[in-house]
């Protein structure tokens, strides 16, 4: 539990549950990072605010700023330790119609490698369109 921010949502929200605490890889102020349980590539991570809030647009300026710092720190670490990574997708889905499956704000950091297809076609809009 981070300063009590997760109280009251443990039974309803996967990102507010006590269980996710054991999966935290890195923290930055008001946000934390975990591995996506349904990765589309190896190393697919999520950046999540501790505070339960619906989506990117309801995040505070501080949460968005902390998320930005954490995304850069995660990218730097991935690039340092995995030479196969050649690029990234950063994705934010806002609302079920836009593909948001957990109604708690989160940002996807998806490492990309040449010639490696996405595992999960739920993110098929990230595939390159070649004619």
Image (spheres, rainbow, N blue to C red):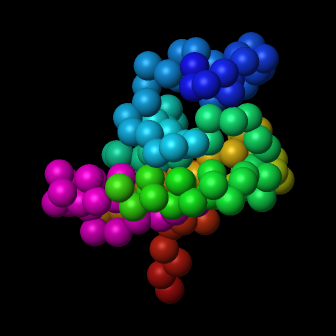
Number of dots carrying numbers: 0
Find residue 11 and report its image quarter: top right
Whether residue 117 is visible: no
Q: Residue furthest front?
A: 3
Find residue 54 and report its image quarter: top right
88 to 41, vertically: above or below: below
Q: Give left or right: position of 76 versus 65.
A: left
**Magenta-tinted stretch:** 74-91
The one nearer the camera, 78 or 115, is 78
Residue at 26%, 53% (x, y): give it: 77
The one nearer the camera, 124 or 78, is 78
Q: Position of residue 66 (x, y in %)?
A: 53, 54
Q: Residue furthest bottom?
A: 131
Residue at 18%, 57% (x, y): give it: 80
Residue at 72%, 18% (x, y): give it: 7
Residue at 47%, 64% (x, y): give it: 89
Q: Position of residue 88 (x, y in %)?
A: 40, 65
Quadrant into which the N terminus falls: top right
Q: Position of residue 127 (x, y in %)?
A: 50, 67
Whether residue 61 is visible: yes
Q: Is residue 88 rendered magenta in the image?
A: yes
Q: Is residue 6 rendered magenta in the image?
A: no
The one nearer the camera, 111 or 74, is 74
128 to 12, vertically: above or below: below
38 to 86, vertically: above or below: above
Q: Position of residue 119 (x, y in %)?
A: 45, 47
79 to 13, vertically: above or below: below
Q: Give left or right: position of 14 versus 69.
A: right
């Amino acid at each position: 539990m981070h300063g009590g921010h997760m109280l009251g949502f443990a039974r309803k929200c996967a990102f507010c549950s006590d269980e996710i605490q054991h999966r935290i890889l890195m923290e930055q102020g008001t946000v934390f990072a975990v591995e996506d349980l349904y990765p589309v590539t190896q190393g697919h991570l999520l950046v999540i605010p501790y505070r339960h809030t619906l989506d990117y647009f309801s995040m505070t300026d501080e949460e968005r700023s902390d998320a930005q710092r954490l995304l850069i720190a995660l990218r730097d670490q991935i690039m340092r330790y995995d030479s196969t990574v050649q690029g990234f997708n950063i994705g934010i889905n806002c609302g079920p119609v836009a593909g948001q499956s957990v109604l708690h704000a989160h940002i996807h950091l998806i490492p990309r490698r040449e010639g490696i297809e996405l595992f999960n076609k739920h993110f098929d809009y990230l595939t390159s369109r070649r004619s």
